Amino acid sequence: MDNSFFEISAAARKIGEKAMEITRPCFERIDEITEYNQLKMLRAFQDARVSESLFSGSTGYGYDDRGREALDRIFAQVLDTEDALVRHHFASGTHTLTVALFGVLRPGDTMLSVTGVPYDTLQGVIGIGKSYSGSLKDFGIKYEQAELLADGGIDYDGIRAALRPDTKMVYIQRSRGYSLRPSLLAGDLEKISTLVRGIAPDCIIMLDNCYGEFVEKDAPGKYVDLMAGSLIKNPGGGIAPTGGYIAGRADLVEKCAFRLTTPGTGKEIGCTLGHSRELFMGAFHAPHVTGEAVKTAVFAAAVFGLLGYNVTPGYDEIRGDIIQAVLLGNEERLIRFCQGIQSASPIDSFVSPEPWDMPGYDSKVIMAAGAFTLGSSIELSADAPLREPYAVWMQGGLNFHSGKTAVLLAADNMSR
Ligand SMILES: *Cc1c(COP(=O)(O)O)cnc(C)c1O
């Protein structure tokens, strides 16, 4: 590895070389997935007949915005769904998921989470823990939860016991989020889907697909009725400046569009301003960039595994998301890890992250983020709450070459 621009100790370089060696078969597998998804994306662009004229954007109501329609078609095609709603109007992943939930759930309905407690920011939306005015609970939507097994696996018997013929929605979170459970693979989605459809054929199977896009060949559209994700994660390719997508059955996507804009106008309005080109370009890059992020995660798993730390997933485990957790064991190492990652960022490399009291957390949190887009986590980033088991969660990396250097600088910074 070239040492001309960054000072990496001989010891770290040696570990890096060993990590490259043992991950070779994993990288070959990632390349194969990336190529498949990249060509699927290219095919979708051509089938949607994308031309430069679609980038011009619209203002005001945004009627007849052909670029917007083409991007919806592209997302539907690559995610194997009937329809999609891809909009810069979604302010965050949580907002996108919220629109999907409010779009299809009605008072008296029951939503059943089958992957334990949902991602932190969704809890206030549902009305568990903190209950905000306007939460699903406030609108009379009931919530139930099937826990995961002790090892983080899916409890199929538990789902069978909790599911009733009239359960309106089964909710699945694919990514581990900030937990230590494994991410779900397409095969898990298929098993859940078969189980649910056998008991409650009309139940809507909804997927929080954040961090899962393009990590596997098999897209989730075959197994779920509706899914949502954020464009400042995998499917924005590091280029989309904001936004989200909802994809799934056409009748459900329409309901979500009615919620995002108005009942009646739905997908017909919502001007794209000047953002279409960035969203197209981001989508086109997304499969490749996701592959680079997965490589960065695999390399980090190998390096820190070789250094004797517990990592999850292991470098050679099959992944359903781009997140890598490393159990560092104490506070000082968490801080040094995050400072090492930050020092390798293209943006704000000269600042040093410090632990702070983040609202909503019961312990201090440290974060490394040197991103072009505020909060983007397809760009290399790391977060760690300063509490047991002193784990850091890292994700992203627009290209493996800089991701690799960041991992080695983090390792080096810990041994200093
Ligand atoms: C990121 C994420 C969200 C929420 O997205 P925000 O953009 O942070 O609001 C929800 N679920 C999962 C699994 C996520 O990773």
Image (spheres, helix red, strand yellow):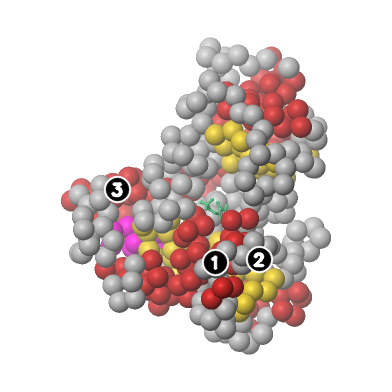
Relative placement, left or right, of 414 versus 47 is right
SS for dot 1: loop
Which corner quadrant of the image does residue 10 belong to? top right
Q: In the rendered structure, find residue 342 and report the number of the disc placed on it.
A: none
The kind of residue on which mark 3 rests is His
Relative placement, left or right, of 76 versus 203 is left
> Which residues are drawn in magenta?
68-76
Q: In the rendered structure, find residue 275 and report the number of the disc placed on it.
A: 3
Where is 128 relative to 309, above or below?
Answer: below
Q: Residue furthest front?
A: 133
Residue receiving disc 2: 128
Residue receiving disc 1: 133
Which callout, 1 or 3, points at the residue further toward the start of the chain?
A: 1
CA–CA distance in space, label 1 to label 3: 32 Å
Residue pictured at 44% horizontal, 39% vertical: 373
Which callout, 1 or 2, points at the residue further toward the start of the chain?
A: 2
